[in-house]
Amino acid sequence: MLKFRICLLWLFAFFTFGCHTVLRPADNGLNSGWISAHYRSHQLSGRIWSVQERSFISERALLKRIQRYNLLLLGEKHDNPDHHRLRSELLRKLCKERPIGTVLFEQLAPGEGEKLGKIRDPDRIASILDWKKRGWPDFKFYKPLFEAAVGCRAKIDGAKTRRVDAKQQKQLQSSYLSKVREDTNLRNLRLKELKESHCNMVPEKILPKILKRQKLWDAEMADALIKKSRSGGQVILLAGNGHIRKDYGVPRYLEAAGIKNSFLSLAFLEVRPELKSPPAYSLTLYAQKLPYDYVWFTPVYDPVDPCRKYFGRK
């Protein structure tokens, strides 16, 4: 039944958008100087898609729009350097238009920014944070973001605790999780997505525990955004594309807290050679439509399937 539904969605996306989407060359500007080498010539590489308007917009238009929001959620594929480069340039452009109060990193825990004090050198920041032991891609990927945050005179802090303790769980459950209901279909799709994203290596009985942890993290990041917003200035969350999804990620918990019109979600997605129309990418995300406000498409950094790369599986 699930495969049948996905096939129907593929057909819907093709016939609805495949023949009506007008593709024009991507803007110059931030799209020049790609680091990722694969599929640079793809017709979507460098294009910015407005999900609500179902049309492409320019970099200039995007910048103008995101200035209006107090909370900005910027996604990433962790190991694509262009995603970090583009976001760092956005930060630099944004802070020329309005003050950025805090930049929150998914890779840091709330309060870790206090360790940095007045240190502004990114390499010293990496050393103090002991980045190499955190399990994230090399610091060179994230260095442009720390440089941009420092250049914007923004505070640097974290948004996600590696392990959420019992006291935190109780608080997050009361303030956020209890206010968000997830239907059975969405839950099943999320479990399937988690299984496949872990290369089908995780036992079925463990998946609900992973899903619970994901929900706690999303609620925690929403909480961090709200708390930092009280200090003034725009607050920017830098996190994986999965966390900034509007159908089940951080935005759901922001809405549960009564914040509905002051945040924006911008994902950075790698193109796929077989997908030529933006709406078709929703199917790769197990969604009926792209679960973001905007999507910025980029070339692919590493085309090798991670499951094949690390586990030898097709």
Image (cartoon, rainbow, N blue to C red):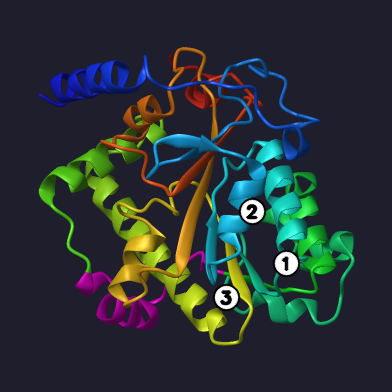
Q: Distance of mark 3 from mark 1, alpha carbons?
A: 27 Å
Q: Amino acid at mark 2?
A: Leu
Q: Nearer the viewer, mark 3 or mark 1?
A: 1
Q: Which label belongs to residue 290?
A: none
303 with respect to 49 (left or right): right
Query: What residue does disc 3 label?
Result: 110
Q: Please indicate whether residue 125 sits to the left or right of residue 215 in the image.
A: right
Instruction: Tell me where the magenta segment starts and ends, as one range.
Output: 159-179
Counting from the top left corner in percent of width and height, residue 247 is at 30, 51
CB under 8 Å between discs 1 and 2: yes
- As helix, strand or loop, the secondary structure at mark 2 comes to helix
Of mark 3 and mark 1, the one earlier in the sequence is 1
- Element under disc 1: loop
Q: Is residue 300 visible?
A: yes
Q: Amino acid at mark 1?
A: Glu
Residue, x 54% and y 62% (percent of image)?
Answer: 72
Query: Which mark, residue 97?
Result: 1
**Earlier along the polypeptide chain: callout 1 or callout 2?**
2
**Residue 274 lies in quadrant:** top left
Which residue corresponds to the image point at 56% horizontal and 57% vertical from the top-left? 65
Q: Is residue 276 depicted above or below 296 in this figure? A: above
Q: Residue at x 32, y 28 (%)?
A: 283
Quadrant housing residue 152 = bottom right
177 magenta-colored:
yes
- Whole-percent x and y of residue 139? 76, 49
Residue 186, given in percent of the width and then of the height, sits at: 20, 46
